[in-house]
Amino acid sequence: MKFLDTLFEQKSRQLAQRSSRRGMLKGLGTLLVGGAAIPLLPVARASAAASKPAEEGDPNSCDYWRYCAIDGFLCGCCGGSANTCPPGTEMSPITWIGTCRNPVDGRNYVISYNDCCGKSSCGACLCQRDEGDRPPYRSDKTNDVNWCLGTSSAVYHCSTAVVVGVAFED
Amino acid sequence: MRTSILVLSLLLSTVCAANESAWDKAHFNYQMFCQGCHTPDGSGANSVPRLKGHVGTFLQTEEGREYLVRVPGSATSSLDNEELAAVLNWILIEFSGDSLAENYEPYKVDEIGRLRRNPLNEVVLYRSKLLADIAHRGDAKQ
């Protein structure tokens, strides 16, 4: 035991002679402040981007940027909007998803084309742009099917185009 | 001394940024390939199975673990093995809640490659049988 006492005493004294007490604080401070400041540098932070981007254009017009992959009647012309269903219809939670480039900021966004269901076809503002549409054998990437799944009624009325995120780009 | 600490901080933040980027990519692939049916928070709807608070249960048996890779939505998706492993691991962390054991093994890329070569044809009955087996194991333990 005496041996251990001597060893630790010697090592403690050596450490005290070689290092300054403030050095430890300084080092720790640099690590904390430096480490906290670096993530503020301008690196790609897709998750930090606002999910509601700056937009321009007419949401009731087929050339509106969010409709790049749509196939249906625009809910904005049917008593709803690009984000909401007309009264008396129910939004399907099961949707066709694609990405569209927003001309305002040049970024691609993930768009969810939730169908509104429960009333017969709206019939106004038919818009069929279909970018990224795949044949029915890729059932998750085809917009030719009725996406009124998961609603109490499978009758299709119109389509919304909700921005749900920023597309990841390598 | 100060330089080495600065280098260490830089390294740490680079690693964090890389992890964050991989996480964002997995989330994006979930959105593009899974979310349309499984919904943004994994709740599912009607016949679409619920992931939220539940998906980790499958990792209690080897067959259950294989099931999550062999379901057609996983096995036949256009994601490559690395992307599919990342999405499945993202789903496990994001949606499992209490259903995932703390000491679970994340999916590995070569494991994904091996399992997805054998996709399931019949899913619904197989899934019920798996869950019944898992529930039975749970009862036997108590």
Image (tube, rainbow, N blue to C red):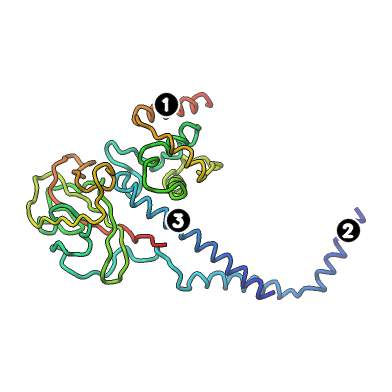
Q: Amino acid at mark 1?
A: Ala
Can you give x and y, in whole percent of width and height, for residue B22 in the image? Answer: 46, 57
Q: What chain letter is assigned to the residue under label 1? A: B
Which residue lies under the disc numbered 1?
A: B132
Q: Amino acid at mark 2?
A: Asp
Figure check: B138 above or below B100:
above
Seen from the viewer's position, the closer of residues B109 and A17 is B109
Which image quadrant: the C terminus of chain A? bottom left
Q: Residues within 10 Å of mark 3 (few under 14, many from 20)?
A: some
Residue located at (27% from left, 61% from top): A100
Q: Which mark's residue is nearer the viewer, 2 or 1?
A: 1
Q: Are labels 2 and 3 on one chain?
A: no
Q: Which mark's residue is nearer the viewer, 1 or 3?
A: 3
Give the Cα separation between the discs numbered 1 and 3: 33 Å
Circle on res. A5? 2
Can you give x and y, in whole percent of width and height, for residue B134 in the image? Answer: 46, 29
Answer with the quarter of the image where residue B46 lies: top left
Figure check: B132 above or below A94:
above
Give the Cα separation between the discs numbered 2 and 3: 50 Å
Residue located at (38% from left, 28% from top): B126
The residue furthest right is A2
Q: Amino acid at mark 3?
A: Trp
Figure check: A151 above or below A8:
above
Give the Cα separation between the discs numbered 2 and 1: 62 Å
Find out whether the residues at labels 2 and 3 contact each other: C-beta distance under 8 Å: no
Q: What chain letter is assigned to the residue under label 3? A: B
Which residue lies under the disc numbered 3?
A: B23
Residue located at (37% from left, 41% from top): B76
Residue located at (41% from left, 41% from top): B53
Question: Tag 3, which secondary structure?
Answer: helix
Question: Tag 2, which secondary structure?
Answer: helix
